[in-house]
Image (tube, helix red, strand yellow):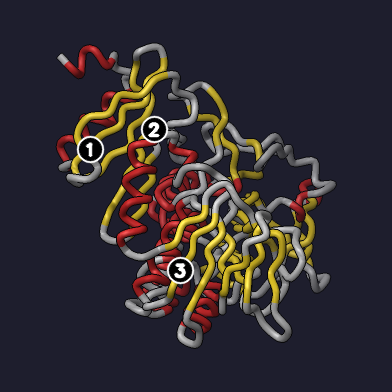
Amino acid sequence: MGTFELMIVGGGLTAARAIESYRAAGGEGRIALLTKERSLPYHRPPLSKRYLRGEAERQDTLVAPQPFYDDNDVELLLGTEVSRVEPREQAVETADGSRYRYRKLLLATGAEPRRLPVEGADLPGVFTLRSLDDATAIREAAAKVRDAVVVGSGFIGMEVAASLTDLGLEVTLVTVDTHLFAQLRSPEISEHLADLYRRRRVGIVFADGVRAFHGRSSLDSVELQSEAVLGAGLAVVGVGVQPALRFLEGSGIAVDDGVLVDRRFRTNVPGVYAAGDVARFFDPLYGRRRRIEHWSNANYQGGEVGKILAGADGGYDTVSTFFTESFGLTLKVFGDTSGHDDRVVRGSFADAHAIVYYLERGRVVGTLHTGQDEETEQELRRAISSRAAFERLAS
């Protein structure tokens, strides 16, 4: 089979964007895309929203159709799980014992959903949502049941709870946190979301977790740590993800909550790069490593690493963004909200027009907002990028 000029392990948005930008920047040679999924690379945001609700079909989620890969001389090795990387040999080994050689390697394996280590977690009717197949299975199950439990109040849990409610199910959202979207540390949006979801008849259980899933041949109820029992024909567990790293054991590629890379996505091993959800990259804006699990980051990093792999200039140099949508409310997060020491709120989420400024030593490091026009959003990005003093913005 010979040696591939570029080999990509992982078949998501990062991989597709890397191929596109690699060729656009003049990258030559054969490309191999190895992914354990059997689908062409697809967008993940529709999986918890439009696709789950039946408003889009599989082909609507694809990043690019089959001719894109044919035109760009990409050998698609779908349904291929990589079990080991051997940087000294510049080779990867797959689960079926096959070996493929490369000159440059991009790791874009993304992340895997965390599962609950409780009784009944493997029962039919208990799902996690990460892949297109997961979303298909949940959509099919939702058509056959009346009630559902969603575990977790991050963006996946919140979006799935809204979508299942829109499909006509009676939904209860269970979270160990005391606020919705607790990671945003904004009581204002948490309170607004709780009110919004209750008005849409979503039950919310705070500060409680799952003790067990029950059912004979399939799920019929969920027992909580508080000993409450909730009827459920299906359950979706959305309690976070972890980077897909197991195949790198023994490779010598440095990992620590992700593959460690610099701002040009280079690992500690020459010729090996990583981008997207799996990469813990250096963000020069904050002077530290970050790992981001959202669509906009995968899209941006795929484009940048493709240019770099082709020998062009590139590297991480942007204000990170993230969006979520539930019951018609779109929230956007710019920058990093995790390291702030103060917050200032302007506007009202109830009026669908609000901005939360996250401050560190009086300077803007991130925002959470809704209902802002493009000009305002550009101003917010500039304020974060320049670490503007909030006093100057408010004056």
Relative vertical location of residue 117 with respect to residue 262 in this rendering, above or below: below
Q: Which quadrant would the N terminus be assigned to in this image?
A: bottom right
Specify few, some or many for label 2: CA neighbours under 10 Å numbering under 14, 14-19, or 20 or more.
many
Separation of marks 2 and 1 at Cα, in angstroms? 16 Å
Which quadrant holds the C terminus? top left
Of the pair 18 and 324, the residue shown nearer to us: 324
Could you tell whether 390 is left or right of 153 in the image?
Answer: left
User: What residue is shown with label 2?
Assistant: 335
Residue 160 x, y percent position in the rendering? 45, 64
The image quarter in which residue 259 lies: top right
Q: Position of residue 274 (x, y in %)?
A: 60, 45
Tell me the residue at 84%/47% (across/down).
250
Q: Are marks 2 and 3 in contact (CB under 8 Å)?
A: no
What residue lies at 49% left-to-right and 67% top-to-bottom? 41
Q: Earlier in the sequence, mark 2 or mark 3?
A: 3
User: Separation of disc 2 and disc 3 at Cα?
Assistant: 32 Å
Q: Amino acid at mark 1?
A: Ala
As rendered, which of 365 and 266 lies closer to the eye?
Answer: 365
Instruction: Residue type at mark 2: give it.
Output: Gly
Label 3 sits on residue: 171
Looking at the rendered image, the disc whose residue lies closer to the viewer, 2 or 3, is 3
